[in-house]
Amino acid sequence: MAVTGVLPFVRGIDFTGNDFQEDYFPKAVSEMTGLRWLKLNKTNIDWIPDELGNLQKLEVLSLVRNNLVTIHGEVTALPCLRYVNCRYNKLKNSGIPVDIFELEDLAVVDFSHNCLREIPRDLEHGKGLLVIENIPSQLFVNLTDLLHLDLSNNKLESLPPQMRRLVNLQTLKLNNNPLGHNQLRQLPALVALQTLHMANTQRSLSNVPTSLDSLTNLQDVDFSQNSLPRVPDALYTLPNLKRLNLSENCIIDISSDVGDLWKNLVTLNLSRNKLKALPATLCKLSKLRRLYINDNQLDFDGIPSGIGKLYSLEVFMASNNNLEMIPEGVVRCGRLKKLVLSNNRLITLPEAIHLLTDLEVLDLHGNPDLIMPPKPEELIMGSGSEYYNIDFSLSTQLRLAGATTNNPVAAPAHSKDPIARKQRLRRKKDDEVDSDQAKVLKGMSDLAKDKKDFALDDKNVSLKPKRWDEALEKPPLDYSDFFDDEVGQVPGLTCWEIENFVPNQVDEALIGKFYEGDCYIILKTLLDENQSLDYQIFYWIGSHATLDKKACSAIHAVNLRNFLGAQCRTIREEQGDESDEFLDLFGSDIVYIEGGRTASGFYTIEEVEYIPRLYRLEN
């Protein structure tokens, strides 16, 4: 790589897939003093290049899938380093420098899939870390600023008392741990807690605190896959609860006061329990948008008749129950988008099912006796009072127009003329032949019309004209410079950041960790009920993002939609005001990081370069 004058202005470089064995690392990298991010994934390096010591502005360093045994060296001398990813290497405990955790700006460290035998030493000094997994109990004393703690999928049988000191903790995940003998006495002290996930932790009524009223910020609770016979009383003391997952328990009934206690509830999952009826006060949850009651013992009487009061309800799933009918109120929820009633004993549905204009998914399979109700006449094209009771005769139309009509003059009687009579008989015979032919033609036309109507009904052809957005033609643009061909072909999340007016795909480990000065495009690829690819496209705007990043994120989100041929709309999300649908993509609250990682296209800050000069003084 030739050394040129532009190297100090390079902001990022990706060497992924190159072979840097045997000291083949480019020496010119040391000249890239303005480098902000560097990817050395799959480069076969087994040492930290000395050239990294000159990259004093480096913030992101990715060393995934190499042969590193140690990272001693220049890494600890990078003062601006925020993100270090060393997954899939051969690191040992002795190969991790102690002073790496003393870097002030270090936010994310990933040492997974290595040869570590214990927690790295001095991890407690990493007070700026935003995501920490599998930490020892003695470290809780100093980690008072910890925001996110994930100890899922371990064999923890107890929690250290020092957890009471985590007064700033916002997310606590303890899923899949044998905590049956732990009483969770530390929970009331975690006053900043917003998310609590304890799925499959052997919860019962005896090992849940009786009250959690001190956790006024708690919004997301997951107690699924436990052995709860009813809802713990502690959950009724959470006034700001928005998402509650109690699936896969043994719950028999719900308190009748639920409508007054969970007024802010948005998502309620009671699937795979033993419910026979829902309380009538459930209809007071005016903000409820998603209700899951699959795999219970509910029948027609078990669903409140006033469920139509849930005017915000968008998802209603009640498969694998004993429903023979559903109350009229279910189809009175005008915003309903997804209705799943599969594997029940349905006989019919309310006629108002045809009035759900926003309905996108209707799953009724597994109901062999189901007969769909007829479509209301007012929804059938060509129906309505305006098409009936109208006299189209000429005399009526002339009378309505104000014209006078003459009475028809009676035809004069024919005289007894044999020649004229013969001609009349001949005309009558010809008229009878014409009449027979007309009858045959009319019968054939009626048969053809009936056959056409039957074919239309059989194929359920829509006679509605195309919507304005369907009639638009996409511009013939080439998006291959922005998006790879593999984008949107595999279910999952993909993320791009805006840099110098164009989108750059970010590493999977960075998804959900957003810089306040940047903008991002997030694509969720999923499979619908027909196993076809479907998409959701969001663009996220940081609170301190520049104008060019805001505009380009919106523009390229539309370009991504056109590139994929998606029918969805692009959704704008702003920092601090994200929708629940957006937050659900990441499974927990997203993480904000101060500053910006990418450069703006409107301006470039360059350091003043002083060129050495030699002057000669003469008398």
Image (tube, rainbow, N blue to C red):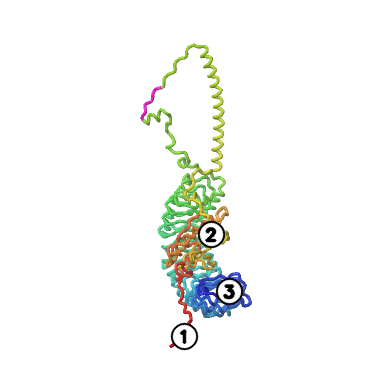
Is 442 a magenta residue? no
Q: In front here: 563 or 138?
A: 563
- Look at the magenta stretch and give its main secondary structure: loop
Label 1 sits on a secondary structure element that is: loop
Return the disc, 3 or 2, that comes first in the chain's sequence.
Answer: 3
Residue 47 picture location, percent across and down: 59, 78
Q: Is residue 229 above or below residue 85?
A: above
Q: In front here: 611 or 225?
A: 611
Q: Alpha-carbon neighbours of circle 1 within 10 Å: few (<14), some, or many (≥20)?
A: few
Q: Alpha-carbon neighbours of circle 3 within 10 Å: few (<14), some, or many (≥20)?
A: few
Q: In front here: 303 or 520?
A: 520
Is 406 a magenta residue? yes
Residue 1 picture location, percent across and down: 58, 74
For the question of whether residue 290 can be seen, the reply is yes
Q: Is residue 264 above or below residue 422?
A: below
Q: Amino acid at mark 1?
A: Arg
Query: Which residue is the site of mark 3?
Result: 1
Question: In the rendered view, does 287 fall on the left or right side of 89?
Answer: left
| Residue 616 tag number | 1
Residue 572 picture location, percent across and down: 45, 60
Q: Which residues are magenta?
A: 402-407
Total numbered circles: 3
Residue 225 picture location, percent across and down: 53, 62
Q: Amino acid at mark 2?
A: Tyr
Query: Which residue is the site of mark 2?
Result: 479
Q: Alpha-carbon neighbours of circle 2 within 10 Å: few (<14), some, or many (≥20)?
A: some
Label 3 sits on a secondary structure element that is: loop
